[in-house]
Image: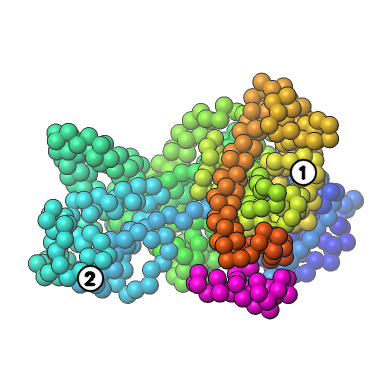
């Protein structure tokens, strides 16, 4: 490694430290690779870590045994590549922030004579578009409230009908489709609604009046739904007396680290008023680094498709790469963007408010009752498994082979992140390899979790470790399987114990151990999800089989075709010649006729 460091180029680039087992420890970027990496070390009297570095870096350097680097053209390229590699490879000593969701915005295109408010998460093309937001929560409730209170064009299709509909009769629309309102009068209504998006008190007051009216009419379910909408709209904003008179647009970020986890608070000020806010927790990774936290948070939040970005981003702490991040964002959005750390005045009060909320959120008790901490201790995991992905596959005699991945995050099932896999491998080992390989391919856009749990024994555990090592991804893995009785695993027999396989050895926990229950719960949810997909797929395949049997294709021929092509879709997409080669011309004629009819 010493020789590699001495021969480093003076170019911008990204460097990676690995330990003796080839595990990735740390990813960093540099304007000048030689100068940056050499600063970590002392070369005389012996080659050793530079003691002036932070304790976190010194600890990492003592574990480091090899170094690799990638040369890029500019420091901006290095910054972006560094961020991508951290997400993809999950290095031991880098912080990984997982809140990379895109927030919705409400927008209106006023180039239309009778425009409507819509929700988007991406940039919408048009010359006369106004965005409001972002709205991390409550955006849909706010949009629905606008259409509840103001008689706007309720549906996109309304204007095409050329005839007043039910919305006009119940006084929720002014029927521009029949010319009952002029574009000028409608524009006045739009201005009122635009005002209500920012100053929401009049809007919530009108909703409360409607809610009371519904309650008086004993329409309690509708009243309860409206109450929930009012609460969602009110929850958009942090309570604050700070109000800037100069109509500034600011995005405010504060990051605070706690004992077992950290928190990010984001606030969005538009027109001098805080219109929305959000927060997210992140797991503690060895020793906290403020520069990495802010750098990652800003680069992840401001993706290329972000509809509207304030020209000034206010952060609660100064950080080393602020200038470079600002330059990168300015290039990305083709406008000058500043990152400020105010020390006094109204902007400093905003960061103080954000930090106050950070401290309050960190004081909240951790709902998981520390079970994840106990799991990490038991299995000697590299980090606390706040985010877990569990895999299982399902088939019946090789038919309708599918896999499922379920996600556990912060003490709840994150069903929006569940994934189903249609698998083509013939054996269970091959199916698991296919499923895990496809998940690894997605690590660039959907980062690795803290832990993988696999349904299966030691073979599946070793398979996952091998695939992750090949991809150079840091990720803990455990597997759970029924003990083998007479050389067979019996899932259904209550007498058979669940065995947990880890890199530290095999664990046989007592049936009443809560840590075992936690692992079993993950496995059972993955099994439920996979088998549901399998049943649905098999039902469809049974229908296809029945149809083809009626056409004169017998079970033996169909099995031969499926063994060769893999799926019904692949059979239908195959050419006449390919099918004839596997079976015969008569079967090919039946299938191609059936395929053209189905189209």
Locate the N terminus and report the quarter of the image it occupies. Answer: bottom right
Of residue 598 and residue 110, the one placed in the foreground of this image is: 598
Under circle 2, the secondary element is: helix
Q: Is residue 153 above or below residue 57?
A: below
Q: Residue at x 17, y 70 (%)?
A: 162
Q: Is residue 297 magenta?
A: no
Q: Residue at x 64, y 37 (%)?
A: 523
462 sits left or right of 147 in the view: right
Q: Is residue 540 above or below residue 514?
A: below
Q: Residue at x 35, y 47 (%)?
A: 138
Disc count in the image? 2
Mark with earlier residue (2, 1):
2
Q: How crowded is the residue under tag 1: few (<14 C-alpha within 10 Å), some, or many (20+)? A: many
* Residue position marked by numbered label 1 in the rendering: 461
Stretch in magenta: 570-599
Examine the rendering and report whether any part of residue 384 can be seen. Answer: yes
Q: Position of residue 274 (x, y in %)?
A: 33, 49
Q: Are the residues flagged by discs 2 and 1 in contact, CB closer than 8 Å?
A: no
Q: Position of residue 229 (x, y in %)?
A: 29, 43
In the picture, the disc for residue 160 is 2
Q: Position of residue 506 (x, y in %)?
A: 80, 32
Under circle 1, the secondary element is: helix
Examine the rendering and report whether any part of residue 348 can be seen. Answer: no
């Amino acid at each position: 490694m010493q020789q590699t460091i001495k021969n480093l180029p003076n170019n911008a680039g990204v460097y990676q430290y690995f330990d003796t087992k080839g595990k990735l420890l740390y990813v960093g970027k540099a304007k000048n690779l030689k100068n940056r990496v050499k600063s970590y070390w002392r070369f005389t009297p012996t080659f050793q870590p530079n003691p002036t570095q932070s304790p976190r870096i010194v600890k990492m350097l003592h574990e480091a045994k090899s170094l690799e680097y990638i040369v890029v053209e500019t420091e901006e390229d290095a910054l972006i590549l560094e961020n991508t590699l951290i997400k993809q490879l999950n290095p031991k000593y880098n912080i990984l922030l997982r809140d990379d969701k895109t927030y919705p915005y409400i927008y209106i295109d006023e180039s239309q004579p009778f425009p409507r408010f819509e929700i988007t998460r991406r940039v919408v093309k048009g010359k006369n578009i106004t965005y409001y937001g972002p709205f991390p929560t409550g955006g849909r409730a706010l949009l629905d409230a606008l259409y509840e209170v103001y008689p706007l064009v309720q549906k996109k299709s309304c204007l095409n009908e050329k005839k007043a509909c039910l919305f006009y009769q119940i006084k929720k629309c002014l029927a521009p489709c029949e010319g009952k309102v002029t574009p000028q009068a409608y524009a006045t209504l739009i201005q009122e609604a635009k005002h209500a998006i920012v100053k929401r008190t009049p809007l919530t007051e009108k909703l409360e009046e409607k809610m009371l009216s519904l309650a008086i009419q004993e329409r309690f379910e509708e009243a309860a739904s409206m109450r929930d909408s009012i609460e969602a709209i009110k929850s958009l904003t942090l309570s604050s007396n700070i109000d800037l008179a100069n109509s500034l647009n600011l995005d405010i970020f504060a990051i605070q680290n706690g004992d077992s986890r950290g928190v990010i608070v984001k606030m969005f000020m538009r027109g001098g008023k805080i219109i929305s806010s959000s927060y997210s927790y992140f797991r503690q990774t060895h020793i906290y680094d403020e520069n990495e936290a802010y750098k990652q948070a800003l680069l992840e939040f401001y993706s290329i498709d972000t509809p509207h970005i304030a020209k000034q981003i206010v952060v609660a702490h100064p950080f080393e790469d602020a200038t470079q991040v600002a330059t990168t964002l300015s290039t990305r959005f083709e406008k000058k963007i500043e990152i400020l750390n105010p020390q006094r005045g109204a902007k400093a009060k905003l960061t103080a408010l954000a930090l106050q909320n950070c401290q309050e959120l960190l004081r909240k008790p951790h709902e998981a009752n520390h079970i994840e901490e106990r799991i990490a201790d038991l299995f000697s995991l590299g980090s606390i498994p706040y985010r877990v992905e569990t895999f299982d596959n399902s088939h019946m005699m090789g038919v309708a082979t599918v896999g499922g991945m379920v996600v556990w995050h912060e003490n709840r099932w994150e069903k929006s992140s569940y994934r189903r896999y249609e698998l083509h491998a013939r054996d269970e080992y091959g199916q698991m390899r296919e499923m895990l390989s496809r998940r690894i391919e997605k690590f660039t856009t959907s980062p690795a979790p803290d832990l993988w749990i696999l349904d299966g024994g030691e073979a599946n555990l070793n398979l996952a470790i091998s695939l992750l090592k090949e991809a150079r991804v840091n990720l803990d893995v455990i597997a759970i399987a029924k003990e083998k009785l007479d050389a067979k695993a019996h899932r259904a027999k209550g007498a058979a114990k669940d065995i947990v396989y880890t890199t530290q050895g095999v664990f046989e926990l007592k049936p009443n151990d809560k840590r075992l229950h936690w692992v079993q719960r993950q496995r059972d949810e993955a099994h439920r999800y996979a088998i549901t997909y399998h049943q649905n797929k098999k039902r469809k395949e049974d229908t296809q089989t029945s149809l083809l049997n009626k056409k004169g294709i017998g079970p033996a021929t169909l099995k031969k075709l499926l063994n060769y092509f893999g799926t019904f879709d692949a059979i239908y997409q195959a050419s006449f010649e390919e099918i004839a080669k596997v079976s015969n011309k008569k079967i090919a004629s039946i299938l191609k006729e059936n395929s053209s009819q189905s189209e």
